[in-house]
Amino acid sequence: MKIVALAGGVGGAKLAHGLAQILPPEDLTVIVNTGDDFEHLGMYICPDLDTVCYTLAGLANPETGWGRVNETWNTIANIEKLGGPAWFRLGDQDIATHLERTRRMKEGQSLSQTTKDFCGAWGIKQTVLPMSDSPVRTIVDTDEGELAFQEYFVHRHCEPRVKGFRFDGVQVAESAIGAREAIDSAQAIVICPSNPWVSVDPILRVIKKINKPVVAVSPIIGGQTVKGPAAKMYSELGIEPSALAVAEHYGNLLNGFVLDNVDKNLSDKIEARTLVTNTLMNNFSDRARLATDVLNFIRSL
Amino acid sequence: MKIVALAGGVGGAKLAHGLAQILPPEDLTVIVNTGDDFEHLGMYICPDLDTVCYTLAGLANPETGWGRVNETWNTIANIEKLGGPAWFRLGDQDIATHLERTRRMKEGQSLSQTTKDFCGAWGIKQTVLPMSDSPVRTIVDTDEGELAFQEYFVHRHCEPRVKGFRFDGVQVAESAIGAREAIDSAQAIVICPSNPWVSVDPILRVIKKINKPVVAVSPIIGGQTVKGPAAKMYSELGIEPSALAVAEHYGNLLNGFVLDNVDKNLSDKIEARTLVTNTLMNNFSDRARLATDVLNFIRSL
């Protein structure tokens, strides 16, 4: 069963890793949000892409979900001593990814080719694609004005109140080579439990038409997110954060929706077919179990 | 006694450090070669400037003379795993210097201002100046064609035979702000035991007029260099490598010349006044002892 997973950072990477544990590698393509990408200290940084790749490769820090396991922090500590910006926590191993990617892209290599090469070096057998090889930049409109995503997310700790979002460059961005073909040959599309507003929407905007069954997994459990600002964003946009709100966000796109046991009372209010299960992923086997549930749900649709 | 020292990398840094141990900080200005600077992995790297600063700050690796003490190598190891260039050995702490310098210079800060700020952060009380804020690039003409300096020096391990040198940009480069004033108020100029061809010549070409007594310390001892390709360069250019050859290289510029005890038989052949002493610097006190000898020699001229 060929599957295309759409993923943002930590939550998306976990389910992608679950699917990778179950499916043959050639049957899984992960299309990753690049709206969070930014230039920092002269380096081209792709936080979601790196989180997905590190997670699939078994190189991710299990404590944080992002960054590398057994990481050291000597570069950023010394940048801080020199009075440089240290708010974006870059580990020494992680910096290698950014430096080498930046070098390749300055030589004209595309982000998707760089990603393919890096996946090869890291032993990742699944296909990981950036949503686009063209720059798309998520801009958060807040009560303090417009902020670039990482400025809002990391530097300002999501503190400014959200009023809306826009995705610079999304109108002209084409999906990365291979993304369309992967969707066309997939049995279903899985929207991973990532932030609907800033992780999944940019991917959907770039991909445009999806003529395959779509199943989304709610990133909101009991009105809260495991990680990240999705629930806070819903509230600030005047919507009560809930699995129902997520399902309504995706609307007609959905054929199936997966929500947590704690939200089973919401199931009846959701138009799409639903699967109520344990959606928390605390360890590797949780990821595989949820992936199995999602795949069985897809088969049942 | 106000002194201006002209320095390249490791050898120059050692004598600069010796002078720094003897002179009050406000009496020492070190003007450093930037002809070896290059862009690598998107970073603006100044090998000689960093070696001088790390040495003065007590942060240099005592084994190699270049790079940082207690260094880790996690970034470069991971760049290598990704198939990137690993021939220029960049430590994790050292990379902070390059990233933060590159960030500042992209924002328009001059190399000399960046150097001043970094010296402040590292607790260096002496004045360290790049020879120029304009790019000057040492190009080595070899039997395999022209090579950028680091390509010749590090990547090719000085293997190609040298035919000559040129310094791209030297005609239009002005000396860094403060260099002229430091020379004008100095009692003497000390040419440190650095490579005459590729470390000192670029500085002299940028500085142009020196209206003060000049004393050079030979980097060649018993026909050999402690480190680096100066002796090999002399041979390939058809000149027998020796302290005498170094003195003749600087010619009329010199008022005094310092050569090692093992070369005392060459002393009579040198036109400038000479000091024959132990010029090997194996430890911190050797550096201070040689600096004391050089300062006493200057007083005697």
Image (cartoon, coloured by chain):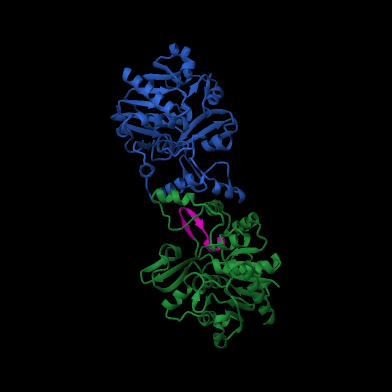
Chain colours: A blue, B green
Task: Give above or below for A278 relative to A64.
Answer: above
Give the magenta part as a residue range: B38-50
Q: Is residue B42 magenta?
A: yes
Regarding residue A226, the answer to whether it shows in the image is yes
Q: Quadrant of residue B147?
A: bottom left
Q: Looking at the image, how many numbered discs can be counted on the residues?
A: 0
Q: Is residue A107 magenta?
A: no
Residue A86 placed where, x, y %? 58, 44
Q: Is residue B118 left or right of residue B248?
A: right
At 45% across and 74% down in the image, what residue appears?
B233
Quadrant (top left/top right/bottom left/bottom right) for the N terminus of chain A:
top left
User: In this view of the protein, which residue sits in the foreground, B215 or B80?
Assistant: B80
At 43% across and 58% down in the image, what residue appears?
B87
Residue B151 placed where, x, y %? 42, 63
Regarding residue B8, the answer to whether it shows in the image is no
Q: Is residue A242 left or right of residue A56?
A: right
Residue B95 placed where, x, y %? 52, 53
Residue A247 placed where, x, y %? 44, 19
